[in-house]
Image (cartoon, rainbow, N blue to C red):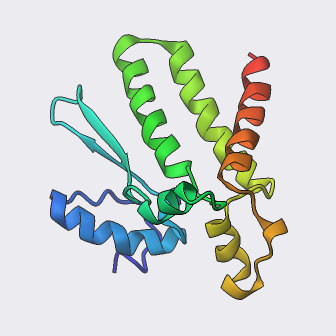
């Protein structure tokens, strides 16, 4: 029922159950590169945010060989921004909260503008239809995010 629902609920799981279910939920996103999990302690003061995809060892091995990679950093970025947003809340630091919000917005806007990594291009076009011109490599994508974040931050 959860997979067919329109959402609107919180699905609280124990650690292992969350690991198992997150892989199913990630299919709805199309890429583990977009999924972050946030664990909150009962006191609300301590959180852990992490990317659902693990360490992406295959991409790292390609990078070590000097091969081009197109690794999606969005889940890792959102893990950091969720941590920064929580720190901002605890410290009542509006500037840090704004930075975290802006970085998340830039990630979404950049992808919506058509700049994406290979995993997302495959989700849109299909595995056999993706050309190199349809996506950015890891460094190109990070550079595009940095460029767009700089523009957004300069408007403050």
* Quadrant including the C terminus: top right
Q: Position of residue 27 (x, y in %)?
A: 46, 75
Which residue is drawn at the image coordinates 19% and 67% (left, top)? 17
Where is 98 relative to 20, above or below? Answer: above
Q: Position of residue 4 (x, y in %)?
A: 43, 80
Q: Residue furthest front?
A: 65
Instruction: Report the side of 4 relative to 122 (left or right).
Output: left
Where is 38 relative to 89, above or below? Answer: below
Q: Residue furthest right?
A: 133
Which residue is drawn at the image coordinates 77% and 33% (left, top)? 147
> Which of the two residues, 10 or 69, is positioned nearer the viewer here?
69
Q: Position of residue 102 (x, y in %)?
A: 64, 31
Q: Quadrant of residue 18?
A: bottom left
Q: Residue furthest bottom?
A: 128
Labels in figure, total: 0
Which residue is drawn at the image coordinates 62% and 57% (left, top)? 66
Where is 136 relative to 23, above or below? Answer: above
Q: Position of residue 10 (x, y in %)?
A: 32, 56
* Quadrant including the N terminus: bottom left
> Which of the two residues, 70 or 144, is positioned nearer the viewer here?
70
Q: Quadrant of residue 72?
A: bottom right
Which residue is drawn at the image coordinates 52% and 67% (left, top)? 31
């Amino acid at each position: 029922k959860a997979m067919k629902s329109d959402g609107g609920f919180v699905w609280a799981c124990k650690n292992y159950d969350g690991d198992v279910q997150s892989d199913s939920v990630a299919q709805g996103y199309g890429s583990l590169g977009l999924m972050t999990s946030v664990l909150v302690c009962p006191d609300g003061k301590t959180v852990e945010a992490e990317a659902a995809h693990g360490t992406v060892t295959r991409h790292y091995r390609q990078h070590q060989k000097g091969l081009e990679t197109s690794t999606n950093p969005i889940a890792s970025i959102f893990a950091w921004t969720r941590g920064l947003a929580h720190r901002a809340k605890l410290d009542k630091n509006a500037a840090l909260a704004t930075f975290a919000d802006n970085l998340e917005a830039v990630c979404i806007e950049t992808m919506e503008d058509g700049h994406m990594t290979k995993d997302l291009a495959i989700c849109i076009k299909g595995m056999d239809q993706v050309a190199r011109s349809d996506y950015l490599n890891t460094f190109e994508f990070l550079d595009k995010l940095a460029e767009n974040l700089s523009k957004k931050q300069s408007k403050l």
